[in-house]
Amino acid sequence: MIRHLVGLMVTDMVQATDARLKESKAKSALEIQKLSHNVIGYSEDTQHRNRELKDFLYASLYRHYRVIRMQVKAEHIITDLFNAYLLEPLILPDHVQAWIPTRGLERTICDYIAGMTDRFAIEEHERLHDPYLRP
């Protein structure tokens, strides 16, 4: 379905752009740049449908309360990990500590966290903050 949707959008953009190019009667890239309007883009119908889809996704998916909850949880986990490593860099694995002299502490921590999978970050957070778990 996604492949089909992308195909429709690409086809529409090529056709709408071709029509605008012919309508503009521009003979060079410089003439196109001097136009007061964009030549490359979707047809009005596809622009409208694309806006409707984006509005729907924003309201129904991106701003859904469950997605927001997960986002907030993830932000807390990442913040807690960063602060724990910053407060005590010796809890970082040895190979990661070796990056500190060349990258700096903050960049090392960011790079380390960025390389974590979601599952690993959650487990690492639990290991660092749950007093009943073994390190």
Image (spheres, grey):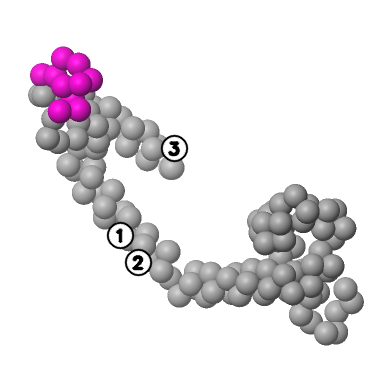
> Mark 3: few, some, or many residues within 10 Å (few <14, many ≥20)?
few
Check disc 2 and report its element: helix, strand or loop.
helix
- Residue pointed to by mark 2: 59
Q: Which range is magenta?
A: 25-34
> Is 125 situated left or right of 70 in this image?
right
Residue 5 in the image: x percent, y percent? 37, 40
Check disc 1 and report its element: helix, strand or loop.
helix
Can residue 104 be seen here? The reply is yes
Q: Amino acid at mark 3?
A: Arg
Q: Amino acid at mark 2?
A: Ala
Quadrant in the picture for residue 13: top left
- Among numbered discs 3 and 1, the one appearing first in the sequence: 3
- Among numbered discs 3 and 2, the one appearing first in the sequence: 3
Whole-Å distance between the Cαs marked 2 and 1? 6 Å
> Is 49 situated left or right of 80 in this image?
left
Above or below 81: residue 112: above
- Residue pointed to by mark 1: 55
Quadrant in the picture for residue 45: top left
Does the stretch in magenta take in 110? no
From the image, give the main secondary structure of the stretch colored magenta. Answer: helix
- Residue pointed to by mark 3: 3
Whole-Å distance between the Cαs marked 3 and 2? 23 Å
Contact, CB < 8 Å: mark 3 with mark 2? no
> Mark 2: few, some, or many residues within 10 Å (few <14, many ≥20)?
few
Contact, CB < 8 Å: mark 2 with mark 1? yes
> Mark 1: few, some, or many residues within 10 Å (few <14, many ≥20)?
few
Above or below 87: residue 31: above
